[in-house]
Amino acid sequence: MKKYTYTEKKDTRSGFGAGLAHLGRTNPNVVALCADLIGSLKMNEFIKENPERFFQIGIAEANMMGIAAGLTIGGKIPFTGTFAGFSTGRVYDQIRQSIAYSDKNVKICASHAGLTLGEDGATHQILEDLGLMKMLPGMTVINTCDYNQTEAATVAIAEHYGPVYLRFGRPVVPIYMPKFTDTEHENKFVIGKGIQMTEGTDVTIIATGHLVWEALQASEELEAKGISAEVINIHTIKPLDEEIIIKSVAKTGCIVTAEEHNFLGGLGESVARTLALNTPAPQEFVATNDTFGESGTPAQLMDKYGLNAAAIVASAQKVIQRKQA
């Protein structure tokens, strides 16, 4: 089994900042808007180099979405930036009516998603954003796993026409995906195409965002127990790469999905629908269980809510037993 290691940790929001800065230098149509969170969204470099292409909207997120939609009419490619809770729940009507329904080319970029927002607590820890956004017709939904993948995804969505929700986070996490490069090669970020991280025969583990690294650690623990796990990195929640999922489960016969999100409406439910329509198989969900979060460090919260390698290992063992029953 391929082993993944890392030499550095960075927050995924900094990957967004790097990608946005790259776009500032290479795509003159890209503009950025922020709701008074420039530092948190790591937009400083873009602003320094392109002050005329940045709009500080202030704490007026609904207004920001309307302005972004309007900017597309003139051919601009607006990237909005604020926390995930404010990027979705607070402005859902504006996104639905002014962006999704109108098929506007707006890139909704959301930091501080999920439990790993940490100490700010439940009011800021949105765990339903992926579900909210994937239900909007025409909305592409992406949830990246590390700094490099976030940088690459940020650049890729500028080339994709249509509304996009890009989700990333606050904490520092291992960097283990290939370094971003803006050329056509095998490591180029492809929207809607999952990545097979390891090969296995006993259980499929489908993970997204920060849980991809936990899934890789779980696969090593499972290997030590004599269990062969196939890990797939699903960075695009919608459109979902159904082909890679069906192919893997046809081999392993069971699946675990892992996400920093409510099990209601998230990646796991999309995978379950794919299986039900194509190749039904036992599935276990590593996700929050219809609950809000609470204040704590990211590590404490991920442990308490069962979003870690240990939970994935336990779920893999359980689903294998179900398969064999």
Image (cartoon, grey):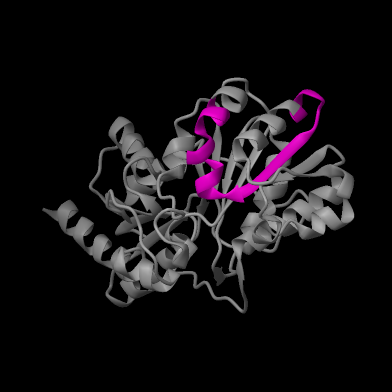
Residue 228 seen anywhere in this rendered image of the structure: yes
Q: State which region is magenta.
A: 71-96
Q: Is residue 191 above or below residue 201?
A: above
Choose top left, top right, bottom left or bottom right for residue 27.
top right
In the image, is residue 70 part of the stretch drawn in magenta? no
Say left or right for 192 vs 227.
Answer: right
Q: Is residue 121 left or right of residue 32?
A: left
Residue 8, position in %: x, y? Answer: 62, 77
> In the rendered image, which quarter is residue 149 located in?
bottom right
- Can you give x and y, in whole percent of width and height, for residue 91 in the image? 54, 36
Residue 199: x and y in percent read 43, 60
Residue found at x 62% / y 70%? 10
Instruction: Identify whether 200 is placed above or below 4.
Output: above
Q: Nearer the viewer, residue 310 or 292?
A: 292
- Find residue 42 and report its image quarter: bottom right
Indicate whether residue 74 is drawn in magenta.
Answer: yes
Residue at the extreme front of the image, as rendered: 59
Q: Is residue 235 visible?
A: no
Residue 143 position in % (x across, y down): 53, 50
* Residue farthest top in this picture: 102
Q: Quadrant of the N terminus?
A: bottom left
- From this view, report whether residue 81 is shown above or below residue 122: above
| Residue plotted at (44% across, 31% down) | 135
For the residue pair 292 and 305, the one nearer the viewer reads as 292
Residue at 35% in and 63% down = 307
Residue appearing at x 36%, y 40% in the figure: 265
